[in-house]
Amino acid sequence: MRKSDHIRRWGGEEFLMILRSSNLEAAKHVAQKLKGTLEQFQFSVVGKVTASFGVTAFRAGEDFNTLLSRADKALYLAKKNGRNRVESIT
């Protein structure tokens, strides 16, 4: 991650990443890379884990809640389509 990027816990098992200097394609690439890294990591307590990612990009003039709603829809699409995937909504 870059200094301009932010990651925060956004609920129980959900996290929010804000990639300020990335377009949709770059953000999807970051999500795919992180998903792959998590798949290969062996955690001492739980072992292997998987992750689903919902990715979107800011649209000029929209507010944060609209952006967040679209990202949440993309996340639930990833879960609906089999989990452990990256889905995006433009």
Image (cartoon, grey):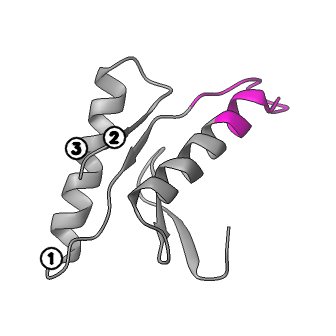
The x and y percentages for residue 75 are 33, 40
Depth check: 9 or 65 in front? 65
Q: Amino acid at mark 1?
A: Glu
Looking at the image, which residue is at 15% across and 66% down?
66
On whether residue 20 falls in the magenta region, the answer is no
Q: Secondary structure at mark 3?
A: helix
Q: Provide the major secondary structure of the magenta segment.
A: loop
Circle 2 residue: 75
The residue that mark 3 highlights is 73
Residue appearing at x 67%, y 34% in the figure: 36
Q: Is 79 left or right of 59, judged from the image as shown?
A: right
Give the quadrant of the N terminus. bottom right
Q: Secondary structure at mark 1?
A: loop
Residue 47, magenta (yes or no): yes
Sequence-first tag of 1 and 3: 1
For the residues labelled 1 and 3, the Cα–Cα distance comes to 16 Å
Q: Can you say whether 2 is above or below 84 in the image?
A: below
Residue 3 higher or lower than 19, as above or below: below
Badge 2, how many Cα within 10 Å: few under 14, some, many 20+?
many
The three-letter amino acid code for the residue at tag 3 is Lys
